[in-house]
Amino acid sequence: WCRSLTRTRVVWFHVDADDTDPASLFAWLARSVVDPAAAAALPRWSVEQALDPVRFGQRFFRAYADAVCADGIDGTPGGVGDAVLVFDNVHDAAGSPLFCALLHELVKAKPPSTTVVLTSRHVPTAALLPITAHPRFAAIGWADLRCTDDEACAMALAWGLAAPAPELLTLAG
């Protein structure tokens, strides 16, 4: 899906437990900005920001969305205007109410030309519920992602494998 986007800057962020630390989260996000001038314009995390990290997140995410949209799709400054921010493996940090609050601020601050995608192996935790209330929130569940028996057989044949026996498909659900 991301490869099919021709005039869009895509940033793929692999979430892990360390991202529950706001300093780490903001530092990694800042590193994804290619344009040196846009990166320099981002608010900088300091010890004082720890007193109100959500407020800092509000300012940071407004500037970050502008900075990412100023990047070119090939990783050079170019101003594409549209962006997709993918946060992969959100379940690894979803136990942190602060991390979830910061993601909520990101969703609220994003311009209409920016899409935020959160992937998780679990349904949203209570701390992520404010994000799910966003009018443009869409969830893709297991029923949407799982292959049908016909699709599984077609993939096996496309890869040069024998189609799975019907008994195996039944066991796999």
Image (cartoon, grey):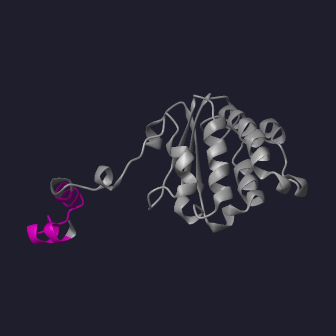
- The total of numbered circles placed on residues is 0
Determine whether 83 is above or below 159 in the image: above
Is residue 89 visible from the viewing direction of this image? Answer: no
Residue 43, position as x, y percentages in the image: 83, 43
In this view, which residue lies farthest toward the front?
126
Horizontally, residue 48 falls left or right of residue 38, namely right
Residue at 57% from the left image edge and 61% from the top image edge: 94
Question: Where, quadrant-wise, is the C terminus in this rendering?
Answer: bottom left
- Magenta includes 145? no
Residue at 36% from the left image edge and 52% from the top image edge: 141
Horizontally, residue 98 falls left or right of residue 9, namely right
Residue 17, position as x, y percentages in the image: 63, 67
Is residue 46 visible from the viewing direction of this image? Answer: yes
Question: Where, quadrant-wise, is the N terminus in this rendering?
Answer: top left
- Magenta includes 156? yes
- Find the magenta span and give its range: 152-171
Determine whether 78 is above or below 91 in the image: above
Residue at 10% from the left image edge and 71% from the top image edge: 167
Residue 51, position as x, y percentages in the image: 85, 55
Horizontally, residue 155 falls left or right of residue 108, namely left
Q: Quadrant of residue 163?
A: bottom left
- Residue toward you, 32 or 117: 117
Residue at 44% from the left image edge and 57% from the top image edge: 123
The secondary structure that dominates the magenta segment is: helix
Residue 58, position as x, y percentages in the image: 74, 41
